[in-house]
Image (cartoon, helix red, strand yellow):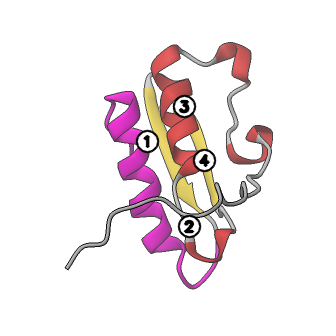
Amino acid sequence: MIAIGYGETDGVKHKSKPLAKLCSVSEADMPVWFKNGVKAATMAPTALNQQKFRISLDGEEPVITAGRGVTTKIDLGIIKYNFEAASGHKCR
């Protein structure tokens, strides 16, 4: 059985780390496709909501690296998937 419906409230917004802590590229220097990918990556779920990843550009290739922690390898897969789905670019 699948339940479909709406909650009584809209819920609460979860905090995200500032973009400068998650990405080494300034927002002014981001191509549109990269900005779309970063936005999707920051909204992706991570274990314990810690967002232990870093996004950078190596030429035209996006690079996403995991921080230290028990679940960061799982988080890395989720982040990469969301980035690639939103940006249309494969990342390393």
80 relative to 58 in the view: left or right: left
Image location (x, y in percent) of residue 35: 56, 25
Q: How many marks?
A: 4
Residues marked 3 and 4 touching at CB (< 8 Å): no
Residue position for label 4: 42
> CA–CA distance between discs 1 and 3?
13 Å
- Disc 3 crowd rating (10 Å Cα; few below 14, some 14-19, many 20+) is some
Which label sits on residue 57? 3
Residue at coordinates 54% horizontally, 55% vertically from top-left? 65
Residue position for label 1: 83
**Residue 39, image quadrant:** top right
Kindly identify the amino acid type of the residue bearing the numbered disc 2: Thr
First reached walking from the N terminus: tag 1 or tag 4: 4
Q: Secondary structure at mark 3?
A: strand
* Residue 78 inside the magenta-drawn segment: yes
Residue at coordinates 35% horizontally, 50% vertically from top-left? 81
In the depicted view, which residue is nearer to us: 92 or 37? 37
In the depicted view, which residue is nearer to us: 38 or 53? 38
Residue at coordinates 67% horizontally, 40% vertically from top-left? 23
Kindly identify the amino acid type of the residue bearing the numbered disc 1: Phe
Residues marked 2 and 1 touching at CB (< 8 Å): no
Which label sits on residue 5? none
Give the residue furthest to the bottom: 70
> CA–CA distance between discs 2 and 1?
13 Å
